[in-house]
Amino acid sequence: MNKYICEFVGTFALVFFGCATVLFMRSEVGLLGVAMAFGLSVIAMAYSIGPISGAHLNPAVSLGVFVSGRMKSGDLIGYVVAQCVGAIVASAVLYVIVEGKGGGYDVAANGFAQNGWSAYSATSAFLFEAVATFLFLVVILRATAEGGAGPLAGLAIGLTLVMIHLAGIAVSGSSVNPARSLGPALFAGGAALSQLWLYIVAPCLGAAAAGLALRVGVIGSGEPAPQPA
C-alpha cells in the first residue's frame, strides 16, 4: 500500500473512531473513554500501517519529523495533504451518520466533536496545545529512534496521546493535531472555524521545536530505528 494512502486511511481511522466516540458515546464512556478512543486508534494504526508510512496521522507529527531531518520536503507535503483529506472524509462520513439520528441532530446546538476553548482563555489553550505537542513529539521521535522503544513504540505513542487528552480536554479540547481539528471544524462552522488557527499554529510550533531539539542533539540522536523488511 502506498505510504500516502496509508496516511489517509490512518488519519481517517483516528478521526472516525475518536470523534465518533465524542459524538455518540461520550455520556456513556466519559472523558476517559474519549481519551482511550483516540489513543487506541493511534496504537492500532501504528501496528498496521506504521511499517509502511510511520503512521504519523497528524501534520504536526510530520512537520516535527521533517524538522528533525528524517523526512524530505516532498514527503512532508504529501503526508499533510493525505492526512487532511483523510480527516475531512472521516468527518463527512460522521456527518452523514449523525444526520440519521431519530428526531434530527442540530450541529450548531450540539457540536460536532470540534476542538475549542471557552472555560479557559485562548492563551491557555495555545500554551497547552504547543507544550503537549512538543512532549508528544519528544516521545514519538525518541521511541522510534534507533535504541528507542522498538516494538513497543506504538504502544508508548498511543498511551501518550491518552495522557494528553486526559490532561487537556477541558482546556482546549485536546487536539495536538491540525487535521483532527480541521475535519470537524469544516462541518461545525462558526466558532470552530474561527478558532481553527490555534489548532494549526500551536501544534506546529510545538512539533517544530521538538524536531529541532532532536536535530541539534538536545534530546538525543535523530537516527530512526530500522524498519522491518
Image (tube, rainbow, N blue to C red):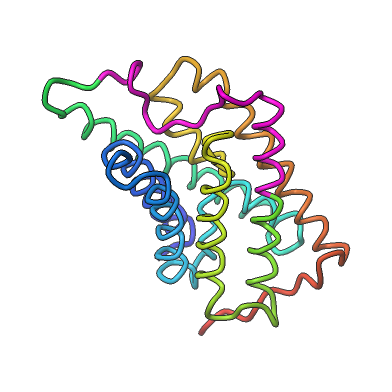
- The residue lying at 80 percent from left, 73 percent from top is 221
- The residue lying at 70 percent from left, 69 percent from top is 142
Residue 205 appears in which quarter of the rendering?
A: top right
Q: Nearer the viewer, residue 217 or 105?
A: 105
Left or right placement of residue 127 versus residue 226 in this view:
right
Left or right placement of residue 169 versus residue 199 in this view:
left
Q: Is the residue 118 above or below the residue 213 in the image? A: above
Q: Quadrant of the N terminus?
A: bottom left
Residue 120 appears in which quarter of the rendering?
A: top right
The spot of residue 29 in percent (x, y) is 32, 47
- The residue lying at 62 percent from left, 34 percent from top is 200
The spot of residue 176 in percent (x, y) is 59, 44
Left or right placement of residue 9 versus residue 226 in this view:
left
* Residue 210 on the magenta span: no
- The residue lying at 52 percent from left, 47 percent from top is 165
Residue 188 appears in which quarter of the rendering?
A: top left
Q: Is the residue 50 above or below the residue 181 in the image? A: below
Q: Nearer the viewer, residue 229 or 181?
A: 181
The spot of residue 118 in percent (x, y) is 55, 22
The spot of residue 168 in percent (x, y) is 57, 42
Count how many numbered circles sit on residues in the image: 0
Left or right placement of residue 95 versus residue 52 in this view:
left
Looking at the rendering, the stretch of residues picked out in magenta corresponds to: 106-133
* Residue 118 on the magenta span: yes
Q: Nearer the viewer, residue 16 or 125?
A: 125
